């Protein structure tokens, strides 16, 4: 007992050696500080947040291994099967079931076989071909970059089978598809349109003009969008690629969504490449030069970003707004998709970018046969989504810092490399954060 007591005092003394918390100092994930007689460990990079002030905040009570009773048995590493069962238990709810169904993907090999008129095309692609023949694609996007082809759009739809899918619960699949296409195309046009009022082609048909962000190139000056790469903490989350000269790859806007920054390229790469973030972080221009230029937009259409729902779930009614959402002005309508995509809302007056989206949406909806007459289009009085939203779910895995939760990960709201929507990420989270190999 004397040995145990001596060791315990030694461990507690070691914990007390941590420096006092300083409100003006930036702390990285894992750092330990002293505050009001207790030790606290940073769960993620933080500055200015008082330890213990917010139970869901940046700090967790920590006294290292001194907390563990020294006569307790050492924690046992779970088997892979046990870890996967724990993952299943944590995600066994209606939210995860619905979201996983809406973001399911077709393999890239199957996507590559999709072509206009192919009788073997998936059901959602055949629906799009019927409602949007190639001639209409050409008409809608009369000023598009040649890289935005009809075939590539069909492939982008094929990758996500929930887009323009069938429904078994009585919902009108054709109507939802028309609504979805009009929504996507309005946002395409605002993000990548030429916006030339003097053109003989109306502005709503000038979308997809820009493949790469205006004024940006892979080799020219500027347009890096890569300052985050210099931060070792954030670069560990989404690891930036390097050029032969040692400079960082550029993550400027590319594709129909004008995807920007490593923290967007990484998750998109994971969704497209079986969880591998490195493919597009190492080769970002694939988002411009391949069918991914349109798949980046369908990806953004189907993926939620809590506390925001996905645009698809807004349109198809899977997302049900609660009282907080309704009070904020959100609902199952086009206006809410403006808030989701770029938050060009609020203030009581329609911003020009939001008005453009509305104008383009009306044109596409009318031509596609979607009646928007009863739909809310304005978001001038809409407030941002908050943690009170019905879509506010934790969808990322992080090391579980809680006492007794050794060799586990927990769901958190902030972004980590381990999306709970991607298969295999719970295992990666446990192995990477705890330094073990699950078997």
Image (cartoon, helix red, strand yellow):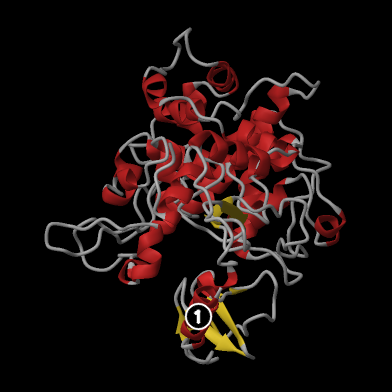
From what the image shows, is residue 312 above or below residue 73?
above
Between 157 and 101, the one lying in front of the other is 101
Q: Kindly tell me whether residue 97 is visible in this rendering.
A: yes
From what the image shows, is residue 233 above or below residue 336?
below
Q: Residues within 10 Å of mark 1 (few under 14, many from 20)?
A: few
Q: Kindly tell me whether residue 364 is visible in this rendering.
A: no
Between 132 and 384, the one lying in front of the other is 384
From what the image shows, is residue 115 above or below residue 18?
above
Q: Secondary structure at mark 1?
A: helix
Tell me the residue at 70%/38% (across/down). 92
Where is residue 259 shown, x and y percent of the image? Answer: 43, 52
Where is residue 157 shown, x and y percent of the image? Answer: 51, 29
Where is residue 410 shown, x and y percent of the image? Answer: 60, 54
417 on left or right of 82: left
63 on left or right of 244: right
Q: Which residue is mark 1?
A: 6
Tell me the residue at 36%/61% (across/down). 236
Which quadrant: the C terminus? top left
How many discs mark residues in the rendered view? 1
160 on left or right of 391: left
Instruction: Name the image quarter holding residue 179.
Output: top right
From what the image shows, is residue 266 above or below residue 20?
above
Residue most extreme to the left:
245
Tell me the residue at 76%/62% (across/down). 382
Between 423 and 146, the one lying in front of the other is 423
Residue most extreme to the top:
119
Which quadrant: the N terminus? bottom right
Where is residue 420 shown, x and y percent of the image? Answer: 56, 45
């Amino acid at each position: 007992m004397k040995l145990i007591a001596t060791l315990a005092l030694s461990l507690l003394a070691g914990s007390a050696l941590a420096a006092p918390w300083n409100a003006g100092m930036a702390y990285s994930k894992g750092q330990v500080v002293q505050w009001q007689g207790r030790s606290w460990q940073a769960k993620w990079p933080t500055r200015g947040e008082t330890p213990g002030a917010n139970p869901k905040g940046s700090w967790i009570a920590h006294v290292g291994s001194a907390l563990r009773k020294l006569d307790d048995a050492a924690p046992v590493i779970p088997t892979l099967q046990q870890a996967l069962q724990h993952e299943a238990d944590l995600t066994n709810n209606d939210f995860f079931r619905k979201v996983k169904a809406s973001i399911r993907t077709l393999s890239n090999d199957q996507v590559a076989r999709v072509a206009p008129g192919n009788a073997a095309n998936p059901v959602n692609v055949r629906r799009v071909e019927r409602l949007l023949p190639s001639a209409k694609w050409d008409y809608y996007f009369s000023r598009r970059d040649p890289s935005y082809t009809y075939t590539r759009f069909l492939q982008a739809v094929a990758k996500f089978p929930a887009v323009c899918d069938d429904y078994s619960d009585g919902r009108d699949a054709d109507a939802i598809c028309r609504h979805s296409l009009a929504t996507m195309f309005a946002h395409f046009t605002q993000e990548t349109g030429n916006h030339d009022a003097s053109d003989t082609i109306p502005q709503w048909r000038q979308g997809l003009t820009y493949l790469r962000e205006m004024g940006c190139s892979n080799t020219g000056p500027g347009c890096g969008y890569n300052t985050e790469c210099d931060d070792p903490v954030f670069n560990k989350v989404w690891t930036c690629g390097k050029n032969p000269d040692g400079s960082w790859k550029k993550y400027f806007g590319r594709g129909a969504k004008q995807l920007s920054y490593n923290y967007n390229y990484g998750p998109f790469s994971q969704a497209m490449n079986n969880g591998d973030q490195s493919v597009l972080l190492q080769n970002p221009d694939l988002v411009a030069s391949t069918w991914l230029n349109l798949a980046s937009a369908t990806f953004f259409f189907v993926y939620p970003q809590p506390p925001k729902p996905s645009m698809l779930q807004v349109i198809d009614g899977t997302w049900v707004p609660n009282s907080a959402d309704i009070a904020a002005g959100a609902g199952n309508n086009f206006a809410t998709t403006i808030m989701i995509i770029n938050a060009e809302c609020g203030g009581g007056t329609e911003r020009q970018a939001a008005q453009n989206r509305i104008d383009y949406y009306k044109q596409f909806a009318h031509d596609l046969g979607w009646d928007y007459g009863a739909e809310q289009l304005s978001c001038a009085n809409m407030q941002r989504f908050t943690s009170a939203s019905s879509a506010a779910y934790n969808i990322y895995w992080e090391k579980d810092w809680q006492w007794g939760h050794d060799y586990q990960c927990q769901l958190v709201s902030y972004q980590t490399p381990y999306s709970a929507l991607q298969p295999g990420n719970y295992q990666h989270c446990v192995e990477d954060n705890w330094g073990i190999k699950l078997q």
